[in-house]
Image (cartoon, rainbow, N blue to C red):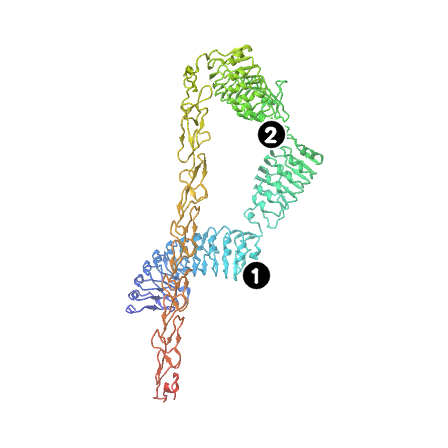
């Protein structure tokens, strides 16, 4: 055989040959077709086959070959088919149905022209499926590469590259194949005829991308695996499925998708049995049962159809989808209540009492709006709050019982919406807190039981709830609660037990408390910190804790006692700052005494809001710093008593606003501080005061005449002692005052010189605070400092300039510091950070605006993006894009593209997201749409945009790469023919590619059609002779005797 070197086709297909395949065949280097299939050959596949460079078709299937698949077969780069055309037996494809062992050589994946029947199945191959199989992108028909019982590993995602696959894709049966079904299977959109993945160890969910196979027409095998999750609704898009769907024998759960009802072409079966499907079968799916073959509707068997999906895995419950009543009372159940109970929207009653349920009450129970009988959750171990959502159950008209649990938190006001309740409303024996909502008074239909006892309810009983006692038979509310005690009160023995002193009023958190009078009780109760709970006693009008040993801070909660008219905390050991919240005590009309403590920090300007304060503001003998707020002048409305600031560490100038307190008749005590500067002449307006003490400060210059005049009516006048009275302020404070003397002649210029960073207040120069500036250094002097412009700051007093914040930083409201903006933001108006909007980004914080993300790029984040990255090939973006848009079928793009380009004529892209367009295969063409097969009578090379008609004497079938010459005995006189015509009787054609037939010569005849030559008439025995053509004008089909 090795000597037949001119042979192009070698076929012994479908015989009973045995023994080894001769290696000598490798000498037949002109071979284009090698067919050994359907015999009984044994031994190895000759490695020498790799030296047959012209082979385009090879089929060794259905033999008894053994050993490994030679890697040398991968050199047969022109092979397009493993299909045995003579027999048409799919079992004979390529090397299928042998006893081959070992792994699949990756070199086979170099056979990139292989288009049909790449069959390796039913051998003894082991190892995993090579990902390189995805290189066989020309594959259109029948990939059965892994149906070997010993194959293992996963299905490579690269198999999705075979987007031209229009035949069978099979990995079954391969009991060791595992892993998930790659989503890339959804790229096989070219009318795959068979998808077989049954009897493996595949896990995970069914990929939604399966729905992309909208043109799929045949069986879908995915049964007998380990698939889980729910069936994707996208399967309903496979509306062309015409045979059967197999998902049986898996662990698929959840409902049967309604969308399966779109599979209206199913004719032979729907197999969903032996899974974990639940809920009712949608009517759209049930309607398919009438169109499939009898006995092939397998949906309910081995599933939980008719049972709510949410309870399939909960062995405690067996709840049908049609449930309207649920009674598991006293069933010895435990664990948490499933939130899925809220899905039983047809329930009219729910009885779960007397079990051992724990955890929170599901808020989803509020969805059971059809409930109109009872909800029994009592005698369990439920914790947490009562869901406000239960207030939606407005048709509940018998019972709501949740007693004897461990519920906490307030009673929801929304329970007052259950106005139809007639029998029982019972929440007793829990840990419910806070006040009883007045809305419960809306339960006016109740007649049998309203019980809230044995909780931690507090405050007064609302009148609307109290009147229910008149109509409810069993009304128990106040017992074992704290009704009458303000909510939030914590027991404190110091204020709740008066046994040691009959004169000490016990408050015990009572809602009726009006006086908090614990003055001079140091021996028994007056030490430790002051309880913050005092702020809850909002009915109090007097707060007296003087002459004790209280320490710590003054509770900020005192600001809630807006009804008090007098506060005295003097003679204690209180420290820290004075709460600004005391400025909320606007009904304070008597006195505020905080003297003789250890209070520190600044004087709150909010104290100036106490415009009704009349008798005294006494802050003496503390450690207060800062200046006296000008707002204290607002106390002028009613202040007739006195002000005490003596013996602190106050500094700064005396505010001129003190002159507004003209009604004062008592004392002005400011001695023993560090106040400096001149005494304001406005103090002279306090003509009624009798005690003025300004000693031991740093006051300078002369006492204004208006102020000195007060000494005549004062019983105590201590002003000059330990001050600098009589000394020029410029000598004492040269930074703040100038000693320039006026000229002998009048001048318009002031005698004070203020430097830049200072301003003139009418009497002296004052240093600008941090965050402010003035750059005036010559008359007329600045009379105030200017806040630094937006985006600038200064951090020193006496500044004449401001510093600009760095890029990406903003200036604080007081202009004393620069704040950082995050990446992904920009500084707006130099004062705040704004997140980058869609399509913009900021790798570092920007000023005024974020950077634009240009066309071809995207930010990936809708807001606060930090980078702008290129779209990958197969996607595009216009400017300011958050995401890239995938190119649709028939278009492609390179990376960083701003638009997808339509494929040129003769090229196409299959599936979305193509980075380039592929040439149409031989035998196909594209004129701006998907590549189509050339019609019969036409042919094309690769990349064709049209098909060329076959010449005369030739023909072609559909999708051919070239035309075939008419065989001898046949002819074709026309172009574009799909077949050749046989020469009629009396005619012949002796060569291939004939465009006409020739008439038999005289003495010759052709008795039938398709003759390649004429037969000669003989007269030796029969005496036959031929009639001349000229005589009959017909072609001779027989010899005439």
Residue 789 seen in the figure: yes
Q: Nearer the viewer, residue 431 or 1033?
A: 1033
Residue 762 locus on image (x, y percent): 47, 20
Q: Which residue is mark 1?
A: 290
Residue 1039 locus on image (x, y percent): 38, 86
Residue 893 locus on image (x, y percent): 39, 53
Tag 1 secondary structure: helix
Marking on residue 487: 2
Q: Nearer the viewer, residue 740 or 544?
A: 740
Is 277 displayed left or right of 112 in the figure?
right
Is 702 displayed left or right of 388 in the figure?
left
Q: How many marks?
A: 2
First along the sequence among labels 1 and 2? 1
Tag 1 and tag 2, C-beta contact below 8 Å: no
Is 115 displayed left or right of 691 in the figure?
left
Compared with residue 761, is residue 456 higher up or lower down, i.e. above or below? below
For the N terminus, give its image quadrant: bottom left
- Indicate which label's residue lies in the foreground, 1 or 2: 2
Residue 436 image-quadrant placement? top right
For the C terminus, give its image quadrant: bottom left
Q: Residues within 10 Å of mark 1 (few under 14, many from 20)?
A: few
Compared with residue 713, is residue 583 higher up or lower down, i.e. above or below? below
Residue 236 locus on image (x, y percent): 51, 56
Residue 529 seen in the figure: no
Is 769 displayed left or right of 635 in the figure?
left
Residue 282 image-quadrant placement? bottom right
Tag 2 secondary structure: loop
Q: Nearer the viewer, residue 1039 or 721?
A: 721
Q: Name the residue at 34% across, 77% down.
A: 990
The residues tagged by marks 1 and 2 sit, at their Cα atoms, a distance apart of: 68 Å
């Amino acid at each position: 055989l090795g000597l037949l070197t001119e042979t192009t086709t070698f076929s012994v297909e479908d015989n009973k040959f045995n023994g080894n395949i001769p290696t000598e065949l490798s000498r037949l280097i002109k071979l284009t077709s090698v067919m050994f299939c359907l015999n009984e050959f044994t031994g190895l596949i000759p490695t020498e086959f790799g030296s047959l460079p012209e082979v385009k078709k090879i089929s060794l299937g259905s033999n008894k070959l053994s050993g490994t698949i030679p890697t040398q077969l991968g050199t047969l780069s022109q092979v397009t088919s493993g299909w045995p055309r003579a027999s048409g037996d799919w079992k004979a494809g390529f090397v299928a149905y042998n006893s081959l062992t070992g792994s699949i050589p990756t070199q086979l994946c170099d056979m990139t022209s292989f288009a049909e029947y790449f069959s390796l199945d039913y051998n003894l191959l082991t190892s995993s499926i090579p990902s390189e199989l995805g290189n066989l992108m020309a594959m259109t028909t029948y990939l059965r590469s892994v149906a070997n019982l010993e194959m293992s590993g996963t299905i490579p995602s690269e198999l999705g590259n075979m987007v031209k696959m229009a035949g069978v894709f099979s990995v079954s049966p391969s009991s060791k194949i595992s892993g998930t079904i790659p989503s890339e299977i959804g790229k096989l959109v070219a009318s795959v005829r068979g998808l077989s993945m049954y009897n493996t160890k595949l896990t995970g969910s069914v990929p939604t991308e399966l729905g992309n196979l909208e043109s799929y027409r045949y069986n879908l095998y995915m049964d007998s695996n380990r698939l889980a999750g729910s069936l994707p609704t996208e399967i309903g898009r496979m509306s062309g499925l015409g045979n059967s769907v197999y998902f049986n024998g898996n662990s698929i759960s959840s409902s049967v998708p309604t969308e399966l009802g779109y599979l209206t072409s199913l004719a032979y079966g729907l197999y969903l049995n032996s899974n974990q499907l639940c809920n009712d079968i949608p009517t759209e799916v049930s309607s398919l049962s009438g169109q499939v073959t009898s006995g092939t509707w397998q949906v309910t068997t081995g599933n939980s159809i008719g049972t709510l999906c949410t309870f399939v895995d909960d062995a405690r419950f067996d709840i049908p989808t049609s449930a309207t009543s649920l009674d598991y009372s006293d069933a010895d159940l435990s664990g948490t209540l499933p939130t899925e109970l809220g899905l039983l929207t047809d329930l009219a009653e729910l009885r779960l009492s007397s079990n051992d349920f724990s955890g929170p009450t599901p808020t989803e129970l509020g969805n059971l709006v059809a409930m109109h009988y009872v909800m029994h959750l009592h005698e369990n171990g439920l914790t947490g709050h009562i869901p406000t959502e239960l207030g939606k159950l407005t048709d509940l008209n018998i019972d709501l019982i949740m007693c004897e649990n461990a519920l906490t938190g307030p009673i929801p006001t929304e329970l007052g919406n259950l106005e139809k309740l007639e029998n029982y409303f019972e929440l007793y024996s829990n840990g419910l807190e806070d006040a009883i909502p007045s809305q419960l008074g809306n339960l006016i239909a109740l007649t049998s039981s309203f019980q809230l006892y044995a909780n931690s309810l507090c405050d007064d009983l609302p009148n609307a709830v109290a009147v229910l006692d008149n109509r409810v038979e069993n009304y128990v509310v106040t017992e074992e609660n704290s009704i009458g005690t303000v909510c939030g009160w914590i027991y404190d023995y110091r204020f709740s037990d008066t046994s040691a002193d009959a004169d000490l009023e016990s408050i015990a958190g009572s809602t009726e408390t009006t006086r908090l009078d614990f003055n001079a009780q140091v021996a028994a109760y007056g030490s430790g910190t002051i309880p913050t709970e005092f702020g809850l006693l909002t009915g109090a009008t007097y707060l007296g804790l003087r002459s004790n040993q209280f320490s710590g801070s003054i509770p900020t909660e005192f600001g809630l006692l807006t009804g008090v008219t007098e506060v005295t905390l003097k003679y204690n050991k209180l420290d820290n700052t004075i709460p600004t919240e005391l400025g909320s005590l606007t009904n304070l009309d008597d006195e505020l005494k905080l003297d003789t403590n250890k209070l520190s920090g600044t004087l709150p300007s909010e104290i100036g809001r106490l415009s009704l304060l009349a008798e005294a503001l006494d802050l003496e003998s503390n450690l207060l710093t800062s200046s006296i707020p000008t707002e204290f002048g607002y106390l002028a409305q009613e202040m007739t008593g006195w002000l005490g600031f003596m013996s602190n560490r106050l500094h700064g100038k005396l505010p001129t606003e003190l002159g507004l307190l003209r009604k004062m008749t008592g004392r002005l005590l400011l001695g023993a501080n560090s106040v400096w500067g001149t005494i304001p002449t406005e103090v002279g307006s306090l003509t009624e005061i009798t005690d003025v003490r300004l000693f031991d400060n740093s006051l300078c210059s002369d006492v204004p005449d208006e102020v000195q005049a007060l000494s005549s009516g004062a019983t105590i006048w201590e002003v000059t002692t330990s001050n600098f009275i009589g000394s020029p302020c410029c000598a004492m404070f040269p930074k703040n005052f100038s000693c320039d003397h006026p000229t002998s002649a009048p001048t318009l210029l002031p005698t004070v010189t203020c430097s830049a960073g200072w301003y003139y207040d009418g009497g002296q120069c004052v240093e600008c605070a941090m965050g402010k500036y003035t750059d005036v250094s010559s008359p007329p002097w600045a009379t105030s400092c200017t806040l630094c412009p937006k985006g600038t700051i200064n951090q020193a007093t006496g500044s004449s300039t401001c510093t600009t914040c760095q890029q990406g930083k903003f200036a604080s409201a007081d202009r004393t510091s620069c704040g950082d903006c995050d990446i992904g933001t920009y500084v707006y108006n130099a004062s705040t950070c704004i997140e980058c909007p869609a399509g913009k980004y900021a790798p570092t914080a920007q000023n005024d605006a974020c950077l634009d993300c240009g066309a071809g790029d995207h930010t990936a984040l809708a807001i606060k993006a930090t980078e702008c990255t290129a779209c990958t090939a197969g996607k595009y973006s216009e400017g300011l894009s958050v995401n890239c848009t995938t190119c649709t079928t028939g278009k492609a793009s390179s990376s960083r593209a701003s638009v997808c380009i339509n494929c040129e004529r003769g090229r196409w892209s299959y599936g979305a997201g193509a980075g380039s367009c592929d040439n149409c295969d031989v035998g196909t063409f594209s004129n701006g749409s998907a590549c189509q097969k050339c019609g019969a009578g036409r042919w094309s090379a690769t990349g064709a945009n049209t098909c060329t008609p076959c010449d005369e004497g030739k023909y072609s079938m559909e999708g051919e790469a070239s035309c075939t010459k008419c065989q001898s005995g046949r002819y074709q006189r026309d172009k574009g023919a799909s077949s050749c015509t046989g020469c009629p009787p009396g005619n012949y054609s002796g060569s291939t590619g004939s465009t006409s037939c020739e008439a038999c010569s005289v003495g010759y005849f052709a008795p039938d059609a398709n003759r390649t030559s004429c037969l000669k008439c003989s007269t030796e025995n029969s005496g036959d002779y031929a009639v001349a053509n000229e005589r009959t004008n017909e072609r001779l089909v027989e010899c005439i005797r």
